[in-house]
Image: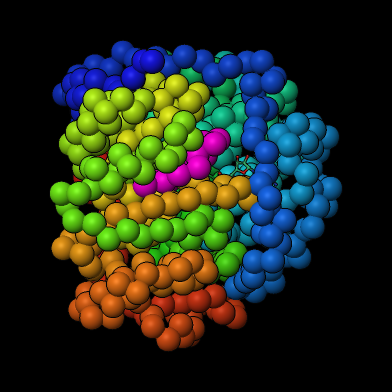
Amino acid sequence: MKFCVSPSGGGGGGEGARGFGRGGGPKVVYVPPPPPEEESSVFAHYETGINFDKYDDILVDVSGSNSPKAIMTFEEAGLCESLSRNVTKSGYVKPTPVQKHGIPIISAGRDLMACAQTGSGKTAAFLLPILQQLMSDGVAASKFSEVQEPEAIIVAPTRELINQIYLEARKFAYGTCVRPVVVYGGINTGYTIREVLKGCNVLCGTPGRLLDIIGRGKVGLSKLRYLVLDEADRMLDMGFEPDMRKLVSSPGMPAKEERQTLMFSATYPEDIQRLAADFLKTDYLFLAVGVVGGACSDVEQHIIQVDQYSKREQLLELLKTTGTERTMVFVETKRSADFIATFLCQEKVPTTSIHGDREQREREKALGDFRSGQCPVLVATSVAARGLDIEHVQHVVNFDMPSSIDEYVHRIGRTGRCGNTGRAVSFFNPESDTPLARSLVKVLAGAQQEVPSWLEEIAFSAHGTTGFNPYGKVFASTDTRKGGSFQKEPPQPAVQNTSAAADDEEWE
Ligand code: AMP
């Protein structure tokens, strides 16, 4: 059997790291292989799980005035024939709650901040109404223009996630006149520009590369109608907020009153919600499917108390029980990603790894090997925590606990997607992880998971609070939305909202 951990380092650090890559950095020559063209690959999808219909039982709250009525079926969405056909070919039979509510809100021209649990169909909730509008208006990308003027821009925090969103956009736009393009760091800039200049209606990008291409005058913003921030809380936290401000103040960017701004995530710390309002029209709607920041209830969560020195052995034991089932193992630093992956390979567990210091070619290979099952174990930093939708991921292991509860919610959300069930096992080391205990108890309880008594004890005796609200009280909304009945937490200490991806921040 072949064990396929990627070589470490590889000198690709520059492009993945903030502040590198433009001028001064090593020239990147990597050109990714084109995505498959055959229809069967474009529409390849996995089946919805046994809990898909239970999504309908989740409480939904829309705050704000004059919110449009939800749709119950895709027919009610009024999609044009080609889009409707592509939805069917994707295996979508009925909309998920975030789609039922989000699609009519976007189609009505409203700005939206939407929160729904991981894996519950947020991507289609924004792509379908945008594509529908562009198709019914008959936009067509021009191959002959030296400056492309997309109607929609979608930003996401990591290269792999934006590529995934692009592939979804390409799938839904298949066989139509709408052309999506993706731009992200770690690949050759000349190639990226040539792709954009072939025609671009929906531009998907990571912030650095997007700003670069706009700055080079290859993309004009005068026709922009939609700006989408996926993983919006991450896009507006300390790491990315300056880039988002730069983006919205780029020459030609329509003012917020003149464009539609849409934000999606599974988590929204309260201060980020307030900040997000700067980017939205005053009458935006807030859509909450379930509890804001809640974990996916289809993921069985286990917390195991460990000490630092027993973790490797415990991981090995655990992986013996998971066999060839796909497992993502999260660690806090790039160094430990290399270290743990090497350790597992030595122990004959077919493992690969991904983090922000890897060259893009290596990152894509690692993800490809994991997706195909050639390496059923992927050791990852937070660079893989958000958004990635990989079939057959049955297990998530938090080898190291993340420093924020939101990061925990995103990590475990790599399993239990689209109504399928999954399992997350987290190694809790009281020496280092106690500050997370209270919010962890809350998230476990909120998802009807068993809370270990030792964890409860730590939580109640700990001083550090990370937004724990022991009485489950619903705080009055400080938001301007009417109703405001979504669950609010008391103001939280700064630790909650520092970038969880500190060790592995990605810019391009
Ligand atoms: P997302 O949360 O957007 O990453 O979607 C999670 C997974 O659910 C993806 O594989 C989607 O293709 C799939 N999905 C989204 N909406 C639906 C739907 N209405 N019916 C079936 N599958 C869906």
**Residue positioned 75% across, 62% down in the render:** 70
Q: In the rendered image, which quarter contains the C terminus? A: top left
Tell me which segment is drawn in magenta: 383-397
**Residue positioned 38% across, 80% down in the render:** 469
Q: In which quarter of the view is residue 72 placed?
A: bottom right
Residue 302 magenta-drawn? no
Q: Is residue 251 visible?
A: no
Rendered position, 116 above or below 341 = below
Rendered position, 270 above or below 161 = below
Percent coordinates x, y for residue 86 in the rendering: 74, 32
Q: Is residue 298 left or right of residue 344?
A: right
**Residue positioned 55% across, 78% down in the render:** 484
Residue 396 magenta-drawn? yes
| Front residue (pair 480, 91) | 91
Rendered position, 280 above or below 250 = below
Rendered position, 202 above or below 386 = above
Coloured how? rainbow
- The quadrant of the rendered image in which ligand 1 is seen is top right
| Front residue (pair 141, 39) | 39
| Front residue (pair 143, 237) | 237
Percent coordinates x, y for residue 8 in the rendering: 21, 24
Q: Is residue 322 left or right of residue 88?
A: left
Percent coordinates x, y for residue 404 in the rendering: 30, 60
Q: In which quarter of the view is residue 210 placed?
A: top left
